[in-house]
Image: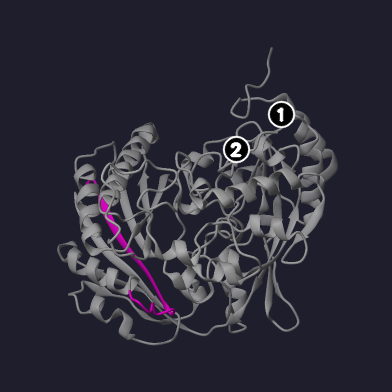
């Protein structure tokens, strides 16, 4: 028989049926292999892993009603698998594309408007953050959104979302006042603090598990120019930079206008490290005191300047390459940062693949100033970073074994910092080797941090690898709420079984 072998098969009779029914209902909004529109979507992925998948057809809806009709059709065809694509920043294969299924490309919904008093921006789920900032900069407004303008609104927000404004307003998802969402039944609904509040909370960190969000209504705030740019220092000064970073991130009173990402990049071909800190101040202030210690260290370059958000976010397009993301959260500590660098360097230095690889370590603070907003806005979120969790480093996280020699209770509590480990390379035959090596490095780093009493359970879902468990890291109470919302709003498990990509909830249908 010439039939499918599940969602990764080369052909799929359910998918053929799905595509035929979608074509009858939505006409030219559907494209097939070889068509220029189909090819354009395939060429838009950030990662070669995603671009290597071949959907049976691609739907580009133009309205929320198009999505509702599509989901009604797809959910009624057993075995028809589908994926939801925004700006496709997440690199893992299957997160936003699919073999022998239907890919719903949301980039046809990218409008940006504001309400009459300009307190809420309504944004189509397929928009990029640059689309949003270009519109809002002209109004002297902003919202909490992605730092790279090419990142999509949908994926970032549903995963929590870190922005330059996070210390002032919280996670990006904390600033959503309403989700317009298509549920598994095909019903179009609005989830907010008063309508479907349990779904509203679940969507704030719950990713693609409950439906397809068509529109995000986001709280705006007045915003003018900001200080943006990078401070570049020689890797030989790394310990001084680690101390400056830890002092800023761990300050008793965090400066809520400061946003910091310390990045270390290793080039396996040249065997060289580079060190650059993206230091943003969300006021038009040159040389703010908060960056004084960092700036006192000898610099190779300093590109900080007064600019607006859209100009800062307009980064160069990312070329399609093989990518890997892994994440962890640690207590802020200069000695730990030095130890982590040594641990990662020990593996990276002797790791070889054809054409080489770029490894990146990006550390960013997650101060209480960020996480406190979750409890204050719209009934909370699902990411599990309360004020209590935001300041306490778990000595033996619930989803990891307890250390054989627990850190004494007298160990001071420290504020967290999130790590993104990224790999970028060109030789696709090395994908498994890179993934296995990254997993080993992350395991070694976890052991190291655990021994120092500085391992946090939280895993930021937007930086996580498929081998990780970010939803589990939200904590049992949040997982229970997410599963309850899934059973209530998707009783047939459409988004658990027919959308195989992403991090699932483990709900039995």
Report helix, strand or loop for mark 2. Answer: loop
Q: Is residue 163 visible?
A: no
Q: Is residue 23 left or right of residue 130?
A: right
> Along the horizontal axis of the image, is 372 left or right of 493?
left
Q: Residue at x 74, y 55 (%)?
A: 181
The numbered disc on residue 456 is none
Mark 2 vs mark 1, foreground winner is 2
227 lies above or below 5? below
- The answer for how far apart the CA atoms under marks 2 and 1 are is 18 Å
Q: Nearer the viewer, residue 99 or 401?
A: 401
- Residue 350 lies in quadrant: top left
Q: Earlier in the sequence, mark 2 or mark 1?
A: 1
Q: Residue furthest top?
A: 1
Where's residue 429, x and y in %? 38, 31
Which segment is the magenta one? 251-270
**In the displayed image of the protein, which residue is found farthest to the bottom?**
285
Q: Residue at x 19, y 45 (%)?
A: 346
Residue 438 as seen in the image, left or right of residue 72? left
- The residue at the point 82 percent across, 46 percent down is 69
Q: Position of residue 272 (x, y in %)?
A: 19, 53
Where does the N terminus fall, quadrant-wise? top right
* Number of numbered labels in the structure image: 2
Specify the quadrant of the image occupied by residue 265: bottom left
Q: What residue does disc 1 label?
A: 79
Q: Is residue 409 above or below residue 486?
A: below
Is 72 above or below relative to 5? below
The single residue placed furthest to the right in the displayed view is: 25
Residue 302 x/y as whole percent: 28, 76
Q: Which residue corresponds to mark 2? A: 506
Q: Residue furthest left?
A: 236
107 drawn magenta: no
């Amino acid at each position: 028989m010439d039939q499918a072998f599940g969602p990764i098969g080369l052909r799929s009779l359910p998918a053929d049926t799905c595509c035929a029914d979608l074509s009858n209902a939505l006409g030219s909004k559907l494209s097939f292999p070889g068509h220029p529109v189909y090819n354009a979507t395939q060429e838009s992925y950030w990662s070669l892993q995603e671009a290597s998948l071949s959907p049976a057809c691609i739907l580009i809806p133009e309205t929320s009603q198009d999505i509702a009709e599509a989901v009604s059709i797809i959910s009624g065809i057993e075995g028809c698998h589908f994926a939801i694509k925004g700006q496709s920043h997440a690199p893992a294969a299957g997160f936003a594309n699919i073999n022998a299924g239907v890919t719903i490309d949301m980039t046809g919904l990218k409008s940006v408007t504001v309400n009459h008093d300009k307190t809420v921006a309504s944004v189509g789920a397929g928009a990029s953050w640059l689309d949003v900032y270009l519109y809002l900069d002209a109004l002297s407004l902003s919202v909490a959104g992605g730092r790279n303008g090419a990142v999509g609104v949908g994926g970032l927000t549903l995963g929590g979302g870190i922005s330059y404004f996070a210390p002032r307003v919280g996670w990006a998802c904390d600033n959503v006042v309403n989700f317009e969402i298509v549920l598994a039944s095909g019903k179009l609904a609005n989830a907010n603090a008063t309508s479907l509040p349990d779904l509203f909370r679940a969507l704030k960190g719950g990713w693609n598990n409950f439906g397809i969000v068509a529109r995000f209504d986001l709280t705006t705030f007045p915003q003018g120019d900001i200080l943006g740019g990078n401070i570049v220092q020689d890797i030989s000064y790394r310990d001084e930079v680690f101390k400056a970073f830890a002092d800023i991130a761990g300050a008793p009173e965090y400066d809520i206008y400061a946003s910091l990402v310390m990045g270390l990049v290793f080039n396996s071909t040249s065997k060289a490290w580079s060190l650059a800190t993206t230091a943003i101040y969300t006021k038009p202030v040159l040389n703010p005191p908060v960056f004084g210690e960092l700036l006192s260290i000898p610099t190779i370059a300093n590109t900080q300047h007064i600019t607006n958000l859209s100009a800062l976010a307009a980064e160069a397009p990312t070329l399609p390459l093989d990518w890997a993301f892994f994440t962890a959260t640690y207590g802020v500590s200069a000695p730990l940062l030095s130890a982590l660098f040594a641990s990662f360097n020990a593996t990276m230095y002797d790791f070889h693949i054809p054409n080489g690889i770029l490894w990146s370590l990006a550390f960013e603070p997650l101060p209480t100033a960020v996480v406190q907003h979750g409890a204050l806005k719209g009934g909370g979120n699902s990411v599990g970073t309360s004020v209590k969790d935001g300041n306490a480093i778990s000595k033996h996280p619930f989803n990891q074994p307890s250390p054989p020699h627990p850190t004494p209770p007298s160990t001071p509590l420290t504020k967290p910092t999130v790590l993104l480990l990224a790999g970028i390379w060109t030789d696709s035959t090395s994908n498994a080797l890179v993934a296995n090596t990254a997993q080993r490095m992350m395991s070694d780093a976890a052991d190291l941090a655990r021994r120092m009493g500085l391992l946090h359970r939280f895993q930021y879902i937007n930086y996580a690898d498929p081998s990780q468990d970010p939803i589990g890291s939200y904590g049992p109470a949040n997982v229970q709420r997410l599963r309850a919302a899934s059973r209530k709003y998707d009783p047939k498990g459409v988004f658990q079984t027919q959308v195989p990509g992403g991090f699932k909830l483990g709900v039995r249908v």
